[in-house]
Amino acid sequence: MVDQGTWCIGNMNSILILNEPWLLKGNRIYNNIEGAHFVRDFVVSSLINQDSKSWNHDVIQQVFSPDISTTILTTPLFDQVEEDTLI
């Protein structure tokens, strides 16, 4: 697989949760994790509190294992970034 860069999270509507490099340091959540079928075809915006552009801790902790939840919750969200951008 060719490294395609890392997503800088803006509106989160372009980035699929699975198999995309949107986590801190370009990490990914792969589709072979337990429960992947629950988030297949979902975008990162479904994990966000849209009014505050913050992670929805309750949803993330219900859907993902503790280690994946921690990885998601430590991935920064910046108000200044408005559009998803692959860098």
Image: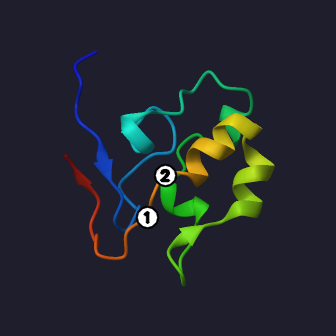
Residue at 57% across, 48% down: 72
Residue at 28 percent across and 70 percent down: it is 81
Residue 13, compared with residue 67, is above or below; it is: below
At label 1, counting other C-alpha atoms closer than 10 Å, the crowd grade (few under 14, some 14-19, many 20 or more) is some
Q: Residue at x 66, y 25 (%)?
A: 33
> How far from the left and from the top, in percent, is residue 4?
22, 31
Question: Which label was assigned to residue 50?
Answer: none
Q: Secondary structure at mark 1?
A: loop
Q: Taking the image as drawn, is residue 39 in sight?
A: no
Picture colour scheme: rainbow
> Above or below — where is 23 with respect to 53?
above
Tell me residue 65's x, y (percent). Answer: 75, 37
Quick one: which residue is furthest to the top in this view? 1
Is disc 2 in contact with disc 1, using a CB cutoff of under 8 Å? yes
Residue at (50%, 75%) from the top-left corner?
Answer: 53
Q: Amino acid at mark 2?
A: Thr
Callout count: 2
- SS of the residue under disc 2: loop
Classify residue 37 by image quadrant: top right
Q: Quadrant of residue 23?
A: top left
Label of residue 75 in the image: 2
Identify residue for label 1.
Answer: 77
Question: Which residue type carries mark 1?
Answer: Leu
Can residue 37 be spotted in the picture? yes
Height in image: 50 above or below 38?
Answer: below
Q: CA distance from mark 2 to mark 1?
A: 7 Å
- Residue 12 drawn at (x, y percent): 41, 61
Determine crowd level at label 2: few under 14, some 14-19, many 20+ residues with C-alpha closer than 10 A.
some
Image position of 60 (left or right of 5): right
